[in-house]
């Protein structure tokens, strides 16, 4: 078109040229780069109790050897945030992952067709050994979109807690056993002592074992009694919301996100 314009010729607009080329199959992507594929958002999953939806990932733990890292394989329960299984290795393989899943399912008595396991798209998650293990155990796999960390938010939040806890070592781990020992102490603290903000400040163990309902009821009774004794202090406002949440969503649809935000504002 620029050349035609130099000759004083105008035939059509640029968009018209592209439209005609497309209609005749002559609008091709230049170069060897493949066309961009849009990946669908993972299926929305909801957990109404423990051992229904698990999430896992493999963060790196620093080694005192420059350029080398240990890998922490860690699985959490989406409903309770309970760490259901973990191991530390010096390599990233589908075999390590499948063995960890087998042990976790055995420990928590997971039956066939009971569990969904969500993860990122790394090779250990989608390796043949791992997928074969999931099929044998009757576990439905679920995967994040490539390079979209928001699709695996519970594991991401878990690892942020791990690496920002005051007990996290200021120096790299001197050995695989040192890293394993530290994670062992962290997991015990996290499951049994850490009051998790995402589950109304109960511990993951309390939530996983069903003890959180009684804890929340007791807190609510304490707040209601305090309000009744001194109503002027609240000035008509509601007390802290200690209601038990029965559903936890992973990658919910936008309508569900809006509904949850409205409920939080109302509370």
Image (cartoon, rainbow, N blue to C red):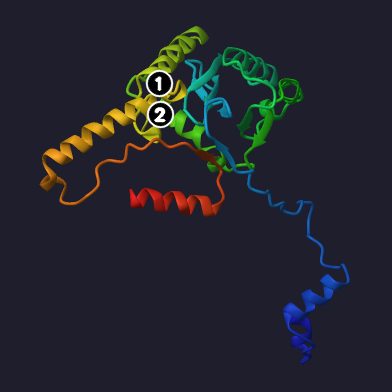
Q: Is residue 13 above or below residue 255?
A: below
Between the residue at mark 2 and the residue at mark 1, the CA separation in whole angstroms equals 9 Å
**Picture quadrant where residue 112 is located:** top right
Q: Is residue 108 above or below residue 258?
A: above
- Label total for image: 2
Instruction: Compare residues 125 and 169 and report the one nearer the observer.
Output: 125
Residue 68 seen in this snapshot:
no
Which residue ends up furthest to the right in the rendered image?
Answer: 24
- Residue topped by disc 2: 161
Q: Which mark sits nearer the N-terminus, 2 or 1?
A: 2
**Residue at 17% of width from left, 40% of height from top?**
227
- Residue topped by disc 1: 190
Q: Position of residue 7 (x, y in %)?
A: 78, 89
How dense is the environment of label 1, judged by Cα within 10 Å: few (below 14), some, or many (20 and up)?
A: many
Tag 2–tag 1 contact (CB < 8 Å): yes
Which is closer to the viewer, label 2 or label 1?
A: 1
Left-right relation of 65 to 241: right
Circle 1 SS class:
helix
**Picture quadrant where residue 8 is located:** bottom right
Q: Position of residue 123 (x, y in %)?
A: 69, 29
How dense is the environment of label 2, judged by Cα within 10 Å: few (below 14), some, or many (20 and up)?
A: some
Instruction: Compare residues 230 and 189 and report the one nearer the observer.
Output: 230
Quarter of the picture holding the N terminus: bottom right
Instruction: Compare residues 135 and 17 and report the one nearer the observer.
Output: 135
**Residue at 58% of width from left, 29% of height from top?**
52
């Amino acid at each position: 078109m620029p050349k035609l314009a130099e000759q004083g010729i105008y035939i059509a607009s640029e968009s018209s040229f592209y439209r005609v080329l497309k209609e005749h199959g002559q609008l091709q992507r230049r170069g060897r780069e493949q066309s961009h594929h849009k990946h669908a958002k993972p299926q929305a999953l909801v957990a109404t109790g423990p051992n229904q939806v698990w999430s896992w990932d493999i963060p790196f733990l620093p080694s005192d050897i420059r350029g080398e890292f240990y890998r922490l394989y860690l699985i959490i329960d989406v409903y309770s945030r309970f760490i259901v299984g973990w191991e530390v290795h010096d390599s990233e393989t589908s075999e390590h992952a499948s063995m960890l899943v087998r042990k976790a399912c055995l420990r928590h008595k997971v039956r066939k067709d009971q569990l969904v396991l969500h993860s990122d798209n790394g090779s250990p998650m989608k390796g043949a050994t791992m997928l074969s293990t999931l099929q044998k155990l009757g576990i439905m796999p679920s995967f994040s979109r490539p390079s979209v960390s928001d699709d695996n938010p519970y594991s991401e939040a878990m690892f942020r807690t791990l690496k920002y806890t005051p007990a996290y070592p200021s120096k790299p781990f001197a050995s695989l056993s040192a890293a394993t020992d530290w994670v062992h102490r962290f997991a015990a603290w996290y499951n049994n002592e850490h009051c998790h903000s995402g589950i109304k400040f109960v511990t993951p163990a309390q939530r996983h074992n069903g003890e959180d309902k009684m804890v929340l009821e007791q807190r609510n009774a304490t707040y209601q009694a305090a309000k009744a004794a001194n109503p002027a202090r609240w000035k008509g406002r509601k007390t802290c919301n200690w209601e038990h949440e029965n559903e936890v969503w992973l990658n919910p649809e936008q309508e569900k996100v809006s509904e949850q935000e409205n409920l939080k504002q109302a509370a």
